[in-house]
């Protein structure tokens, strides 16, 4: 189980607010019927094959060529016509390309092909940090210089994309291939038919469709005007509607560039077949990020109101936060209510209420995110952001921070769990067992020792529980054997698991631990807790 509990260390706070640039489409005149307008006066030059518009000059029999209009080559959807797409792009974005300075061209090339991708990668860094470069470590002069370079490059790219020559005049579609690991860290095998690697599991695709309604592209969106048929660039085949008036730029061939931090509204998810192999088609529309942020905020308010009512606590208290900045955001908003309801059904409700109220006293929260936890300030609080922190918390699934009494849970990243038989399995997405484990840490500290002049001390750090850990610490899971705190959280998780085998194992293998926690919680109030 990839979770971590904060220990004592260098403790200062990084308090940098997230900065977003928001895409705002503007309405412009459309030219969808340009072909009809010019149909009667268009010929084709025999040498170039490019359409030229001719005009009859008054009083003369001579035809004089007018300026070429690239929109005559335009198609709202070039589909598989890569050659046609490249011809149109070359003509349509000529003025945009000609207006670029050497500095502009340099940053565009850096975005396309990073010179040192391991140490400086614009799009990868934006994705990792949820679109906020100020979450990067900034302790050393070198780190400060890197952030400054990102800052300058992002400002430069944003200026380039605001050039009026790059604004789209019509609604059009772009295509993008994507690997599942990039999308939501799911292995391709999860969606494939086990009996045929070229086919997809219909039930798994239905599950994806139910969860996938919207998302956010925190990095710069790059798409092709024509689709690359088949291939091994990922199971996901995006087809994205780009509204008229969208800021854009041209990278190369028929590849276009669009703003970072833009919203994606999902229209459909279905199976398509290309070259004898099945892929996942995602039909989406580019929308202002504010529209997606509003949907996420509404879900957060609904969740909060529901739980304040359940817990019978002050309706003004807010202890849920949804920090979502990636393409699969809706999978978390749609799953979180059921997720928390499972906690409510499995853990004594009075215990939940006590712990939540204790967290709320200092502004503690339960945060659900799709950003790597190493870049979430509530994770590292009260420490400053450092390279060591990034390395330590990277790929962590969930964490309880006793210093701010906050649970942070990544609903996208995978984790590895150990079942009652000791078998390990990779779990993708929302895993309630991991969450109950972290809630167990919160319980551990709630019953521990609070001293405002000292770091919090968990009940699992007391001599009484450490003696129990010495006897039973290796009896449950490998992860639980790491230390007394992880053992307490694992025992708590198994005691309140929906899996009867796990409940039986913890009662049988760690009876003293179960007795300790039952007495701590007043578990005798719940005689059916371990019933089938």
Image (cartoon, rainbow, N blue to C red):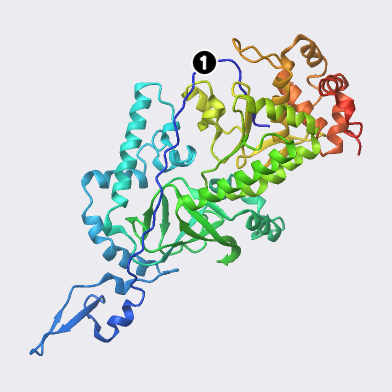
- Horizontally, residue 397 falls left or right of residue 155, namely right
Near-viewer residue (108 or 499): 499
Please give the count of numbered marks on the rendered protein. Answer: 1
Image quadrant in which the N terminus is located: top right
Image quadrant in which the C terminus is located: top right
In the rendered image of this protein, does residue 464 appear above or below residue 153? above
- The residue positioned 74% from the left and 17% from the top of the image is 460
- Residue 414 appears in the picture as rendered: yes
Q: Which residue position holds label 1?
A: 10
**Residue 99, image x and y in percent?**
21, 54
In the rendered image of this protein, does residue 143 appear above or below residue 263? above
- The residue positioned 18% from the left and 73% from the top of the image is 67
Residue 204, by quadrant, is bottom right
Near-viewer residue (346 or 387): 346
- Horizontally, residue 187 falls left or right of residue 153, namely right
- Residue 187 appears in the picture as rendered: no
- The residue positioned 37% from the left and 36% from the top of the image is 116
Residue 412, by quadrant, is top right
Near-viewer residue (309 or 253): 309
Please rate how many residues cluster around mark 1, counting C-alpha atoms within 10 Å: few if below 14, some from 14 to 19, many from 20.
Answer: few
**Residue 387, image x and y in percent?**
47, 24
SS class, disc 1? loop
**Residue 218, image x and y in percent?**
46, 45
């Amino acid at each position: 189980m990839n979770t971590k509990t904060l220990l004592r260390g260098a403790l200062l706070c990084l308090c940098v607010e997230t900065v977003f640039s928001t895409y705002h489409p503007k309405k412009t005149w459309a030219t969808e019927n340009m072909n009809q307008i010019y149909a009667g006066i268009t010929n084709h030059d025999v040498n170039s094959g490019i359409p030229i518009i001719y005009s009859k000059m008054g009083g003369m029999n001579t035809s004089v060529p007018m300026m070429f209009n690239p929109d005559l080559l335009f198609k709202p959807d070039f589909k598989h016509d890569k050659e046609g797409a490249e011809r149109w792009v070359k003509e349509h974005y000529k003025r945009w390309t000609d207006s670029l300075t050497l500095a502009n061209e340099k940053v565009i090339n850096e975005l396309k092909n990073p010179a040192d991708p391991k140490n400086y990668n614009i799009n990868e860094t934006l994705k990792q940090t949820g679109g906020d470069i100020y979450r990067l470590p900034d302790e050393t002069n070198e780190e400060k210089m890197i952030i400054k370079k990102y800052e300058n490059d992002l400002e430069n790219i944003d200026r380039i994309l605001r050039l009026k020559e790059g604004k789209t005049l019509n609604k059009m579609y772009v295509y993008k291939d994507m690997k599942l690991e990039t999308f939501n860290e799911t292995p391709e095998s999860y969606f494939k038919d086990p009996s045929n690697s070229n086919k997809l599991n219909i039930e798994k695709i239905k599950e994806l469709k139910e969860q996938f309604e919207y998302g956010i592209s925190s990095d710069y969106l790059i798409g092709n005007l024509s689709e690359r048929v088949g291939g091994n660039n990922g199971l996901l085949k995006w087809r994205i509607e780009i509204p008229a008036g969208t800021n854009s730029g041209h990278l190369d061939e028929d590849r276009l560039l669009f703003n970072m931090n833009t919203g994606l509204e999902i229209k459909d998810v279905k199976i398509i077949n290309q070259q004898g192999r099945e892929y996942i088609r995602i039909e989406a529309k580019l929308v202002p990020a504010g529209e997606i942020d509003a949907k996420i905020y509404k879900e957060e308010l609904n969740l909060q109101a529901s739980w304040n009512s359940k817990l019978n606590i002050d309706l003004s208290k807010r202890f849920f936060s949804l920090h979502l900045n990636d393409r699969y955001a809706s999978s978390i908003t749609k799953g979180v209510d059921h997720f928390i309801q499972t906690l409510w059904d499995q853990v004594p409700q009075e215990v939940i209420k006590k712990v939540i109220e204790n967290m709320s006293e200092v502004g503690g929260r339960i945060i659900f995110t799709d950003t790597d936890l190493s870049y979430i300030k509530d994770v590292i609080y009260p420490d400053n952001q450092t390279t060591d922190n990034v390395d330590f918390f990277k790929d962590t699934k969930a964490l309880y921070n006793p210093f701010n009494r906050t649970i942070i849970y990544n609903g996208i990243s995978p984790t590895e769990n150990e079942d009652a038989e000791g078998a390990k399995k990779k779990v993708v997405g929302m895993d309630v067992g991991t969450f109950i484990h972290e809630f167990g840490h919160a319980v551990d500290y709630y019953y521990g020792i609070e001293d405002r002049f000292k770091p919090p001390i968990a009940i699992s750090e007391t001599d009484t529980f450490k003696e129990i850990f010495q006897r039973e610490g290796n009896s449950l899971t490998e992860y639980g054997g790491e230390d007394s705190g992880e053992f307490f959280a694992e025992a708590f998780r198994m005691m309140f698991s929906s899996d009867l085998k796990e409940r039986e194992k913890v009662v049988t293998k760690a009876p003293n631990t179960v007795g300790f926690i039952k007495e701590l919680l007043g578990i005798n109030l719940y005689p059916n807790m371990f019933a089938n």
